Amino acid sequence: MTHALPPLNALRAFEAAARHLSFKLAAHELHVTPAAVGQQVKALEARLGVQLFERLHKQLILTAAGQAYLPGVSRGFRHIAEATSQLKPAGAVLLQLGVHASLDLRRLDLAQFREAHAEIGLRVLQPAGLHELVEGKVDLLIARSLGHHPGYRCDRVTEGSGLGDWLIAPEGTADCPEIVSFREWLRARAAASPRTNRRPRLVGGVGS
Protein backbone atom coordinates (compact mmCIF):
# COMPACT_ATOMS: atom_id res chain seq x y z
CA MET A 1 0.00 0.00 0.00
CA THR A 2 1.34 3.43 -0.94
CA HIS A 3 0.86 6.11 1.71
CA ALA A 4 0.20 9.65 0.53
CA LEU A 5 2.60 11.60 2.72
CA PRO A 6 3.60 15.26 2.51
CA PRO A 7 7.35 16.04 2.36
CA LEU A 8 9.07 15.35 5.69
CA ASN A 9 10.77 18.77 5.84
CA ALA A 10 7.42 20.50 5.43
CA LEU A 11 5.94 18.43 8.25
CA ARG A 12 8.89 19.23 10.50
CA ALA A 13 8.51 22.93 9.75
CA PHE A 14 4.79 22.81 10.57
CA GLU A 15 5.29 20.81 13.78
CA ALA A 16 8.02 23.13 15.09
CA ALA A 17 6.11 26.29 14.14
CA ALA A 18 2.95 24.94 15.76
CA ARG A 19 4.76 24.15 19.02
CA HIS A 20 6.41 27.55 19.21
CA LEU A 21 3.64 29.50 17.45
CA SER A 22 6.51 31.31 15.79
CA PHE A 23 8.30 30.87 12.48
CA LYS A 24 11.34 32.57 14.01
CA LEU A 25 11.66 30.16 16.93
CA ALA A 26 10.93 27.19 14.68
CA ALA A 27 13.68 28.38 12.34
CA HIS A 28 16.09 28.64 15.27
CA GLU A 29 15.29 25.09 16.35
CA LEU A 30 15.66 23.69 12.82
CA HIS A 31 18.65 25.90 12.00
CA VAL A 32 17.13 27.41 8.88
CA THR A 33 15.74 30.86 8.13
CA PRO A 34 12.23 31.99 9.17
CA ALA A 35 11.50 32.53 5.48
CA ALA A 36 12.37 28.88 4.78
CA VAL A 37 9.98 27.71 7.53
CA GLY A 38 7.24 29.96 6.15
CA GLN A 39 7.76 28.64 2.63
CA GLN A 40 7.64 25.02 3.82
CA VAL A 41 4.41 25.64 5.74
CA LYS A 42 2.87 27.48 2.79
CA ALA A 43 3.78 24.59 0.48
CA LEU A 44 2.25 22.13 2.96
CA GLU A 45 -0.97 24.16 3.13
CA ALA A 46 -1.14 24.21 -0.66
CA ARG A 47 -0.61 20.46 -0.85
CA LEU A 48 -3.25 19.73 1.79
CA GLY A 49 -5.68 22.33 0.52
CA VAL A 50 -6.28 23.74 4.02
CA GLN A 51 -4.97 26.70 5.99
CA LEU A 52 -3.02 25.61 9.07
CA PHE A 53 -2.16 29.02 10.54
CA GLU A 54 -3.72 32.43 10.88
CA ARG A 55 -0.91 34.90 10.19
CA LEU A 56 -1.66 38.01 12.19
CA HIS A 57 0.56 41.00 12.87
CA LYS A 58 3.44 39.65 14.97
CA GLN A 59 1.34 36.63 15.93
CA LEU A 60 0.85 33.11 14.62
CA ILE A 61 -2.32 31.21 15.52
CA LEU A 62 -3.28 27.64 14.65
CA THR A 63 -6.53 27.29 12.74
CA ALA A 64 -8.98 24.56 13.69
CA ALA A 65 -7.43 22.40 10.96
CA GLY A 66 -3.94 23.08 12.32
CA GLN A 67 -5.01 22.16 15.85
CA ALA A 68 -6.52 18.92 14.60
CA TYR A 69 -3.44 18.07 12.50
CA LEU A 70 -0.71 18.79 15.07
CA PRO A 71 -1.25 15.85 17.51
CA GLY A 72 -1.10 13.28 14.74
CA VAL A 73 2.04 14.77 13.20
CA SER A 74 3.79 14.99 16.59
CA ARG A 75 2.74 11.43 17.39
CA GLY A 76 4.07 10.29 14.01
CA PHE A 77 7.51 11.76 14.73
CA ARG A 78 7.56 10.04 18.13
CA HIS A 79 6.66 6.70 16.52
CA ILE A 80 9.45 7.10 13.95
CA ALA A 81 11.94 7.86 16.74
CA GLU A 82 10.77 4.83 18.74
CA ALA A 83 10.91 2.53 15.71
CA THR A 84 14.41 3.77 14.90
CA SER A 85 15.63 3.17 18.45
CA GLN A 86 14.41 -0.44 18.24
CA LEU A 87 16.77 -1.10 15.32
CA LYS A 88 19.80 -0.98 17.62
CA PRO A 89 21.68 -4.31 17.79
CA ALA A 90 20.83 -6.53 20.74
CA GLY A 91 23.21 -6.04 23.65
CA ALA A 92 24.55 -2.75 22.39
CA VAL A 93 23.26 0.80 22.35
CA LEU A 94 24.73 2.96 19.62
CA LEU A 95 25.61 6.57 20.43
CA GLN A 96 26.62 8.80 17.55
CA LEU A 97 28.73 11.70 18.82
CA GLY A 98 29.41 14.67 16.56
CA VAL A 99 32.43 16.86 17.21
CA HIS A 100 33.36 20.20 15.67
CA ALA A 101 36.40 20.28 13.42
CA SER A 102 38.80 22.20 15.66
CA LEU A 103 38.44 20.02 18.77
CA ASP A 104 41.40 17.74 19.49
CA LEU A 105 39.83 14.36 20.28
CA ARG A 106 42.81 13.49 22.46
CA ARG A 107 41.43 15.99 24.99
CA LEU A 108 38.36 13.81 25.46
CA ASP A 109 40.18 10.46 25.80
CA LEU A 110 37.09 8.60 24.60
CA ALA A 111 38.80 5.24 25.16
CA GLN A 112 38.09 5.73 28.87
CA PHE A 113 34.38 6.14 28.18
CA ARG A 114 34.34 3.02 26.01
CA GLU A 115 36.07 1.02 28.76
CA ALA A 116 33.65 2.28 31.41
CA HIS A 117 30.56 1.73 29.23
CA ALA A 118 31.11 -1.41 27.19
CA GLU A 119 27.34 -1.63 26.61
CA ILE A 120 27.40 1.60 24.58
CA GLY A 121 28.83 1.54 21.08
CA LEU A 122 30.27 5.03 20.71
CA ARG A 123 30.84 6.32 17.20
CA VAL A 124 32.36 9.69 16.42
CA LEU A 125 31.74 11.93 13.43
CA GLN A 126 34.20 14.76 12.91
CA PRO A 127 33.69 17.35 11.62
CA ALA A 128 30.04 17.70 12.59
CA GLY A 129 27.82 20.65 13.44
CA LEU A 130 24.24 21.61 14.18
CA HIS A 131 23.17 20.56 10.68
CA GLU A 132 24.20 16.95 11.37
CA LEU A 133 22.37 17.02 14.72
CA VAL A 134 19.18 18.42 13.17
CA GLU A 135 19.30 15.87 10.35
CA GLY A 136 19.71 13.01 12.83
CA LYS A 137 23.18 12.04 11.64
CA VAL A 138 24.44 12.34 15.22
CA ASP A 139 22.63 11.91 18.56
CA LEU A 140 24.83 14.25 20.55
CA LEU A 141 27.10 17.11 19.54
CA ILE A 142 30.08 18.95 20.94
CA ALA A 143 29.84 22.27 19.13
CA ARG A 144 31.68 25.56 19.23
CA SER A 145 28.82 27.94 19.92
CA LEU A 146 27.13 30.30 22.36
CA GLY A 147 24.99 27.48 23.69
CA HIS A 148 21.52 28.92 23.09
CA HIS A 149 19.42 26.68 20.83
CA PRO A 150 15.63 26.41 21.38
CA GLY A 151 14.55 22.78 21.56
CA TYR A 152 17.98 21.56 22.67
CA ARG A 153 19.67 20.98 26.01
CA CYS A 154 23.07 22.68 26.14
CA ASP A 155 25.79 22.00 28.73
CA ARG A 156 29.00 23.99 28.63
CA VAL A 157 32.14 21.87 28.24
CA THR A 158 34.80 24.58 28.56
CA GLU A 159 35.11 27.21 31.26
CA GLY A 160 34.32 30.87 30.74
CA SER A 161 31.54 32.81 29.10
CA GLY A 162 30.69 33.63 25.50
CA LEU A 163 31.77 31.40 22.65
CA GLY A 164 32.92 27.98 23.78
CA ASP A 165 32.45 24.21 23.50
CA TRP A 166 28.96 22.95 24.40
CA LEU A 167 27.46 19.48 24.68
CA ILE A 168 24.16 19.71 22.78
CA ALA A 169 21.32 17.18 22.58
CA PRO A 170 17.68 17.45 21.46
CA GLU A 171 15.39 18.01 24.45
CA GLY A 172 13.35 14.98 23.41
CA THR A 173 16.31 12.60 23.75
CA ALA A 174 18.58 14.49 26.20
CA ASP A 175 17.55 12.15 29.04
CA CYS A 176 18.09 8.90 27.13
CA PRO A 177 20.30 6.57 29.22
CA GLU A 178 23.22 6.56 26.79
CA ILE A 179 23.27 10.35 26.52
CA VAL A 180 22.96 10.75 30.29
CA SER A 181 25.85 8.29 30.70
CA PHE A 182 28.07 10.32 28.39
CA ARG A 183 27.11 13.63 30.03
CA GLU A 184 27.77 12.26 33.53
CA TRP A 185 31.04 10.68 32.43
CA LEU A 186 32.21 13.95 30.94
CA ARG A 187 31.17 15.82 34.11
CA ALA A 188 32.98 13.32 36.35
CA ARG A 189 36.09 13.43 34.21
CA ALA A 190 36.04 17.21 34.27
CA ALA A 191 35.75 17.25 38.06
CA ALA A 192 38.75 14.93 38.35
CA SER A 193 40.88 16.93 35.91
CA PRO A 194 43.05 19.96 36.68
CA ARG A 195 40.93 23.09 36.26
CA THR A 196 42.56 24.55 33.19
CA ASN A 197 41.06 25.74 29.94
CA ARG A 198 42.76 22.87 28.17
CA ARG A 199 40.51 20.35 29.89
CA PRO A 200 36.80 19.73 29.43
CA ARG A 201 34.72 21.06 32.31
CA LEU A 202 31.00 20.41 31.98
CA VAL A 203 29.01 23.10 33.77
CA GLY A 204 25.31 23.76 34.09
CA GLY A 205 22.51 22.68 31.78
CA VAL A 206 20.83 25.28 29.59
CA GLY A 207 17.27 24.37 28.75
CA SER A 208 15.12 26.26 26.25
Image (cartoon, grey):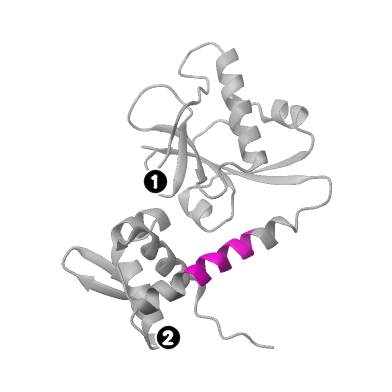
Q: Disc 2 marks which amino acid? A: Leu
> Is residue 108 visible from the viewing direction of this image?
no
Q: Residue shown at 47%/14% (left/top)?
A: 196
Q: Disc 1 marks which amino acid? A: His
Give x and y (percent) for residue 104. Answer: 55, 30
Chief secondary structure of the magenta span? helix
Q: Which residues lie in the magenta part?
A: 71-81
Q: Secondary structure at mark 2?
A: helix
Which callout, 1 or 2, points at the residue further toward the start of the chain?
Answer: 2
Q: Residue shown at 55%/43% (left/top)?
A: 174
Measured in 3D between alpha carbons, the distance from the residue under mark 1 to the one under mark 2, in whole angstroms, is 30 Å
Residue pointed to by mark 2: 48
**Residue 189 colored magenta?**
no
Q: Residue shown at 18%/63% (left/top)?
A: 58
Disc nearest the viewer among 1 and 2? 2
In the rendered structure, are the residues bearing label 1 and label 2 in contact, judged by CB atoms less than 8 Å apart?
Answer: no
Q: Indicate which disc residue 103 carries.
A: none
Q: Secondary structure at mark 1?
A: loop
Residue pointed to by mark 1: 149
